[in-house]
Amino acid sequence: MYSLLVLLLAGASLALALWAFLQWQRSRSAMILFVLLPLAALPIELLAAGFRLWSGEDESARGLGTLALKWAHITLPLSLFALATLCRRVGFAWAKIDWGHGALCILAVLMLIYQLPDVLKFDIQPAAIPVVTWLVFAMYLACGAGLWLRQRWLWLLAGMLPGVLLLLVPSDVAGPLPLYLGKLLTLAAMTVTMVHFTRLFPVVHSTPSE
């Protein structure tokens, strides 16, 4: 039963990733790209987990899931680049200042460097969520609250809050489903928000003068 539900989540995450890719292809927005990178790993992780639950300990599926987790851990801090741009576009005071916007981007790089040693290890436990991931999600939660108050955009907070709460559920008590559903909700909220604000504040590409 768990395997079927995880595979259904894999299908939903694949559909979301393809939709986000099409939105990025149309807009070429870096905001969408930086959330698409960690999102792209989720269908692979869930497919590998679903096949493992279906067929037992499959080493090829285990290796594929580990690679997907490593990619997600590497790229998730980079989503703070998208967050910094979003906060600047909606007019948060700290993000309109160059040092405020730049500080968040520098923090993203430092987070990536901090967790590289753990990512380079051979194996990663799916239920072990790194501290960097929690910090990134906390920043998106704070941004979600700000967007709700400033822009009346509820969906970042509405997706992040239950997603993070599901990530807190121990997997040895409730199984793997809350973990995977929590990841899907958080990444879906981040992606939908970036697509919405890319449409709201479209990037104008300059054309060379004749």
Image (cartoon, rainbow, N blue to C red):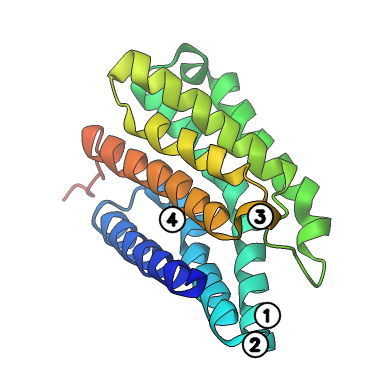
Instruction: Report which residue position mark 2 lands on.
Output: 60
Q: Image point 59% across, 60% down: which residue?
A: 176
Mark 2: which secondary structure?
Answer: helix
* In-front residue for pair 98/6: 6
Residue 192 in the image: above or below residue 44? above
Q: How far apart are marks 2 and 3 (CA)?
A: 23 Å
Mark 4 residue type: Leu
Mark 2 residue type: Ser
Q: How far apart are marks 4 and 2 (CA)?
A: 25 Å
Marker disc for residue 133 = none
Q: Image point 55% across, 69% down: which residue?
A: 45
> Where in the figure is residue 4, as x and y percent of width and height?
43, 74
Mark 1 or mark 3: which is in front? 3
Marker disc for residue 36 = 4
Instruction: Report which residue position mark 1 lands on.
Output: 63
Residue 4 in the image: above or below residue 127? below
Mark 4 or mark 3: which is in front? 3
Mark 4 or 3 closer to N-term?
A: 4
Q: Do the residues labelled 2 and 3 touch (CB within 8 Å)?
A: no
* In-front residue for pair 51/210: 51
65 displayed left or right of 119: left
Marker disc for residue 171 = 3
172 displayed left or right of 31: right
| Residue 68 lies in quadrant | bottom right
Mark 3: which secondary structure?
Answer: helix
Q: Image point 32% across, 44% down: which residue?
A: 192
Mark 2 or 3 closer to N-term?
A: 2
> Where in the figure is residue 168, as x and y percent of width and height?
63, 41
